Amino acid sequence: MEIFLDLATKALMGAVILIAGWVIGNWVNKRVGNIKKLDGTLRSFLGGLAKYAIFALAIITVLQQFGFQTASLLAVLGAAGLAIGLALQGTLSNVSAGVMLLLLRPFNVGDTIATGDVTGTVKSLGLFATEMATPDNIYIFVPNSQLWNTDIQNFSRNDVRRQDILVGISYSDDIEKAFKTIQGVLGKEKRILTDDGREPQIMVTNLGESSVDLTVRLWSQSSDFWSLKVDTTKAVKEALDKGGISIPFPTRTIEMYDASAAAKPAKKKAA
């Protein structure tokens, strides 16, 4: 009878511990899920990790109530965890890289980034991989460890960006006239920023084989970068054409001669 009562008491205590562990785990999971500073994916991962860690601790406590040697059980679980970790080290490296990316946030969903040979817009960031789409809408699945171990260029992070537009004019053209023509185009463009020392610049940056190379340097909002580039390039070309300033292209001079005629011996004059 005493043995039955003892087992019933232990079973009741075990049930209470398991229920308490489950309730506390769910409460911690909910609390972590309400941390707005963390990404949704990271909140879900950390909340679930804390929840099941608490429940696992409750199970170990219940086993101790029934006299199980949990030290040996933990040793077995540790060895099994080590074996699983070695077998899945590539996957686990992606998870750890995903956690670091979610914490440090070098990019967000919707940003356009370049890393290695990959350039595209981030569609989703998970614990194992990041999904992206190229400018021509090709789907890319990038393991997080690949992103974490390479340099990342984020074209969307800064609100303001600078760009250089290269223009070549002929050596016979008036450089000052070309400057004034381009300045007239830039003065009409409202998307170009002119505050905080960001005034547009026009510079002679190279004397090429067939052209004098000018660099038009300007600043704009990141959202206007590409539209401003194509519109300004077109407007500058049209303005230079209208002003009579040519944009030269490389030329080659070819000299031809009759090789057979050169090989014939000269005729001797009659005496």
Image (spheres, rainbow, N blue to C red):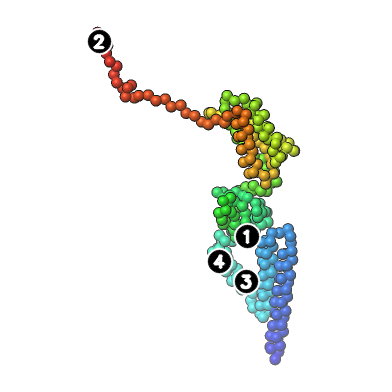
> Can residue 173 be seen in this snapshot?
yes
State if disc 2 and disc 1 touch (CB < 8 Å).
Answer: no
Spatial CA distance of label 1 from label 4 is 25 Å
Q: Nearer the viewer, mark 2 or mark 4?
A: 2
| Residue labelled with disc 2 | 270
Spatial CA distance of label 3 from label 2 is 118 Å
Q: Dot 3, how many residues are within 10 Å of its Cα: few (below 14), some (14-19), or many (20+)?
A: few
Q: Position of residue 28 (x, y in %)?
A: 73, 68
Q: Amino acid at mark 3?
A: Leu
- State the residue lying farthest toward the front: 242
Q: Nearer the viewer, mark 1 or mark 2?
A: 2
| Residue labelled with disc 4 | 83
Spatial CA distance of label 3 from label 1 is 30 Å
- Mark 1 or mark 4: name the one nearer the start of the chain: 4
| Residue labelled with disc 3 | 74
Spatial CA distance of label 1 from label 2 is 97 Å
Q: Position of residue 39 (x, y in %)?
A: 69, 59
Q: Foreground: 158 or 271?
A: 271
Q: Foreground: 6 or 105?
A: 105
- State the residue lying farthest toward the bottom: 1
Q: Foreground: 188 or 93?
A: 188
- Mark 2 or mark 4: name the one nearer the start of the chain: 4
| Residue labelled with disc 1 | 126
